[in-house]
Image (cartoon, rainbow, N blue to C red):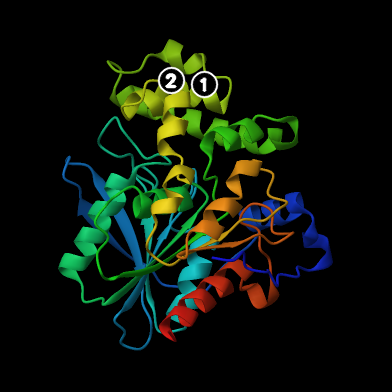
């Protein structure tokens, strides 16, 4: 599809990618949304918590929302999307990846950028137990990569899946990892690493036979974390193998579901390869929008409704008209 011309015009102070990213992550608040938790048991015996919110009117439409690295279902970018769609007659379910709902998961494995197996189980559960005819997917950052990989890696996509939106998505993980290790991203890098290592220390207490204290002490960077834990816990040889096999970029040509990618050009997390212009032009189902501003999941707009949220709604409505 042709590249979509963005219309995003942020307030002056939020043209800066760092400011928009930090404000959106630390200071935004979304009120007046009530979530009801459902716990599902996965086939390997672990669990995932789903946080549901509902339209005031009866609907057969649902949006499934996936968070980013070290996020959860209560992050404002998650609840902001859920609230907007609830207000437009669409139910929403915000997914907490394994170990992200406030309670440690049961297995040594957790979640990662390519963990589409859990998304498959979530979708199967919803289709088998609920009444939705139209289901949309929306993912942020890591969650966006999971959705794109799921849609293009050869899975049988249920007919109920009508559209997808991926926001601030590092679809080339090796390049994004390299960017996160640069000086400009040191504050983000260290914050992510600190949270990941803290959680890993708790997991080490659960699985001391699989992970040593010394291994955790050796983690100095995010790539070290992926070498020590992510790759080993999820069947990859090392971090590089994990990045190569889990990147959604290679699967974009095979997507047959209408999909919108919104990646800001001033997103410091993304490498040049994370702007898949060639892939979008060659695939009629793939729509790529690259606003000049927005940072990483920081598309601040009017009345606390973010640009990516409004664009997701517009994209889906445009498909319904066809």
Task: State the residue in front, 317 or 209.
Answer: 317
Asked if residue 154 is positioned above or below residue 107 in the image, the reply reads below
Q: Quadrant of the C terminus?
A: bottom left
Asked if residue 176 is positioned above or below residue 322 in the image, the reply reads above
Q: Residue furthest front?
A: 282
Distance from the alpha carbon under mark 2 to that under mark 1: 6 Å
Q: Badge 1 is on which residue?
A: 224
Task: State the residue in front, 273 or 218.
Answer: 273
Task: State the residue in front, 224 or 24.
Answer: 224
Q: Is residue 285 visible?
A: yes
Check contact, mark 2 vs mark 1: CB within 8 A: yes
x 37%, y 52%: residue: 152
x 33%, y 39%: residue: 104
Q: Quadrant of the N terminus?
A: bottom right
Q: Tag 1's secondary structure?
A: helix
x 23%, y 53%: residue: 121
**x and y percent of residue 45 in the render?**
17, 41
Task: Write down the quadrant of residue 114 in the picture.
Answer: top left
Numbered tag placed on residue 228 in the rendering: 2
């Amino acid at each position: 599809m042709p590249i979509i011309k963005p219309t995003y015009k942020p307030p002056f102070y939020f043209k800066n990618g760092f400011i928009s990213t930090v404000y959106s992550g630390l200071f935004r608040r979304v009120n007046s949304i009530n979530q009801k938790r459902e716990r599902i048991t996965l086939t390997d015996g672990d669990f995932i918590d789903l946080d549901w919110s509902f339209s005031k009117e009866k609907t057969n439409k649902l949006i499934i929302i996936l968070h980013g690295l070290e996020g959860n279902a209560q992050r404002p970018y998650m609840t902001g999307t859920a609230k907007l769609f609830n207000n437009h007659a669409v139910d929403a379910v915000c997914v907490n990846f394994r170990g992200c709902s406030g309670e440690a998961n049961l297995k040594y494995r957790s979640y990662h950028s390519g963990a589409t197996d859990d998304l498959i189980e979530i979708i199967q559960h919803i289709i088998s137990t609920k009444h939705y005819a139209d289901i949309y997917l929306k993912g942020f950052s890591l969650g966006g990569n999971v959705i794109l990989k799921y849609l293009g890696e050869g899975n049988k996509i249920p007919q109920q899946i009508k559209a997808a939106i991926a926001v601030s998505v590092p679809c080339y993980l090796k390049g994004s990892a390299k960017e996160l290790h640069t000086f400009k991203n040191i504050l983000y890098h260290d914050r992510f690493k600190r949270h990941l290592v803290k959680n890993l220390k708790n997991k080490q207490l659960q699985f001391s036979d699989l992970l040593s204290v010394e291994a955790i002490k050796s983690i100095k960077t995010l790539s070290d974390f992926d070498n020590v834990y992510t790759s080993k816990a999820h069947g990859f040889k090392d971090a590089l193998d994990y990045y190569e096999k889990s990147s959604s970029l290679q699967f974009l040509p095979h997507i047959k579901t209408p999909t919108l990618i919104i990646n800001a050009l001033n997103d410091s997390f993304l490498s040049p390869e994370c702007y898949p212009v060639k892939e979008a032009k060659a695939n009629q189902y793939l729509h790529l929008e690259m606003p000049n501003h927005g940072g990483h999941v920081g598309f601040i707009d009017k009345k606390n409704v973010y640009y990516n949220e409004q664009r997701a709604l517009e994209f889906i409505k445009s498909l319904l008209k066809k």
